[in-house]
Amino acid sequence: MIRGAADRASLFSVNDMGQNSASGKLQSAASSDQDESEYSLLDGRYGIGLSQKDREAFETIKAIKRLRQDSRIDYAEPNYIQKMSLVPDDLHYEQQWHYPAINLPDTWDITTGDASVIVAVIDSGVFMAHEDLSGNLLSTGYDFIVSTSMSNDGDGIDPDPDPDDPGDIVISYSVWHGTHVAGTIAASTNTTTGVAGVAPDVRIMPIRVLGEGGSGASYDVAQGILYAAGLANDSATVPPQAADIINLSLGGAYVNQASKDAISAALNAGVIVIAAKGNDGSDAPHYPSDYEGVVSVGALGMGDEQAYYSNYGPTLDLVAPGGDSKIDADNDGKFDSTILSTSVDVSSGSRESGYDHKQGTSMATPHVAGVIALMKSVYSELTPTLLTALIENGAITTDLSGDGAAVRNDTYGYGKIDALKAVQQAQAIAGGATPPVHDEVGIIYEIDNMVLSSSQTISIVKWSGTFTVDSITLNYPWATLTPTAVDGEGFGDYQLDIDRDQFGDGLYLLDITFVMSNGDQYVTRINVTDRVSTLDERDVGNVYMVLVDESTLNVVKQIRMNLDVALFEPEVPFSMSNVPDGTYLLYAGTDFDGDRLLEDDEYFGRGFYDHDDDIFTSDISPIVVNSADIDSVSIYVGSTSADPVGLID
């Protein structure tokens, strides 16, 4: 070994010499280089100077060059100082197995994020006083829960624009979902307490849209998205700086136009949207993760296996650790295979900083949002389109299926997010490397849920790239796609026709797969429902009509009707008497599961299909009672030529 300096050493290999003779020879070679005259132009006398450390480094390099000229030396090279990858000293970091799983420690040597990057967590709010979060929480968040009964904070959107999470009515049952998500993204790191976050130096914009029981209205979610993107919304205000990334660890089974439009507007504004794929363990539709342009995230267990609960399917983009409570990795009886993050401790009766393990695609999603925030920190020009191209090229993921990094499959999408690859890609592009090109294809249609209609137009548009439509396949024989206005490359308008005589009652997931000449595939999924074959075959059973006070959401009146086969008619009269003056919401449904509650899949008059436009809606128009008869209340049940009508006195 040659020592030019204590921290600037050299390594070499000697051939055909004894160790002692080699050592003596090398020491002689090193001493012969130490001549002050060699530094006559580098010691500051001519206006150029080197520090002592740099002089020693220069001396070492010269010695290495001299050694390399000796034929008896196999190699001579700098003995570089190696530093450990950044390992946080946070108290519970050793339980966060999910960070090394996506190569975060090596990534943190490059960046831990930048305070100029903002991630909006649109969720249940965040415990603003949390010891591991408060330093990274912006004061520009907002509470968009309109319903005071759902918000559990005593007010709606306007009076108190505070995104703080008050918990559920029974505080000990609260899940503190948004606080957990926010901690995964940006919990403070190297504080000797708590946990680490993926991007601990970025900022969180907390936006509250989920209230009691972790539920929220799609419209409130849409308003939160618009606000986060700095776009016009119902609050009549926008944040001073829009979010760069939106995390949506939420969702449901139905398309909501308000949310869909809000996401499109956010994407057009350059905001990246990341959403959870859902926890049903199926390939059923899930929104907003299935909307065009949204990065859809599935979940993995500790061993990179697909989590048992994680949704999958043709719209899945990638996966990240989400945890698996069924696995006890070290057999100690603890949930060590779930995701540890910030939470709230209420054991004292009040809210205090706490930490908790959870699992779900909701937990996987902030891992991805945090990694994208790290990318944005080193390359501020990262856009939704460029991110999509990087994902589709396998540039920021690890292939888990062995089918190729740039090949998507329904189980893992394009693979597991890899923080190191992602940040290195962002660095390279920031340094002038040519970014990958996203061959953009748009598939446009009007009806996501075909309930009564049997045809619609499907348009496939090429926005960029040099390729053609190679083939089109449909997964059911009763559906056909016929070109009506198509160019020579196969792009244009097609007519989708459904032959309802070929299938029975039920919900069918129709997948239309467009395969391009470059091998890319684009899958469009449309729900096709045939609820009832003929009027005579229907047996609705007990239908409950519930009148609810709009302001308190208390039930004022309730009646039950049995609509069996013999009695069912296109128009079924009902009446409620002695209703006080006021404004009400009218619900109707069947209690399929017998739990004495009307739930999302049991409603007729809430969350029903508009049979004129074939659009799913959850809107209910208020009914105003002012001592006058009302005879125009419509509740749509099935495929009838006329609506059943009700009478409220």
Image (cartoon, rainbow, N blue to C red):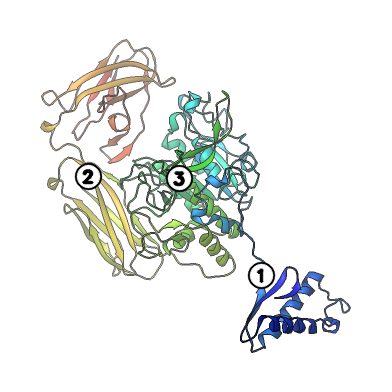
Figure quadrant of the C terminus: top left
Front position in the image: 556 or 569 = 556
Q: Secondary structure at mark 1?
A: loop
Q: Position of residue 529 (x, y in %)?
A: 22, 42
The image quarter containing residue 215 is top left
Query: Which residue is denoted by mark 3 in the rendering?
Result: 330
Q: CA distance from mark 1 to mark 2?
A: 70 Å
Of circles 1 and 2, the one toward us is 1
Of circles 3 and 2, the one toward us is 3
Q: Mark 3–mark 2 contact, CB under 8 Å?
A: no
- Near mark 2 (Cα within 10 A), the count class, few <14, some 14-19 or many ≥20, is some
Query: Which residue is denoted by mark 1 in the rendering?
Result: 80
Residue lying furthest top? 578
Q: Position of residue 56 (x, y in %)?
A: 78, 74
Q: CA distance from mark 3 to mark 1?
A: 37 Å
Front position in the image: 353 or 393 = 353
The image quarter containing residue 65 is bottom right
Task: Determine whether, in the image, residue 632 is placed left or right of residue 439.
Answer: left
Query: Which residue is denoted by mark 2 in the rendering?
Result: 453
Q: Amino acid at mark 1?
A: Tyr
Front position in the image: 354 or 325 = 325
Q: Amino acid at mark 2?
A: Ser
Residue under the point 79% across and 83% down: 33
Of circles 3 and 1, the one toward us is 3
Task: Determine whether, in the image, residue 311 is placed left or right of residue 164.
Answer: left
- Near mark 3 (Cα within 10 A), the count class, few <14, some 14-19 or many ≥20, is few
Disc 3 or 2, which lies upstream in sequence?
3
Q: Secondary structure at mark 2?
A: loop
Disc 3 or 1, which lies upstream in sequence?
1
Q: Position of residue 519 (x, y in %)?
A: 33, 67
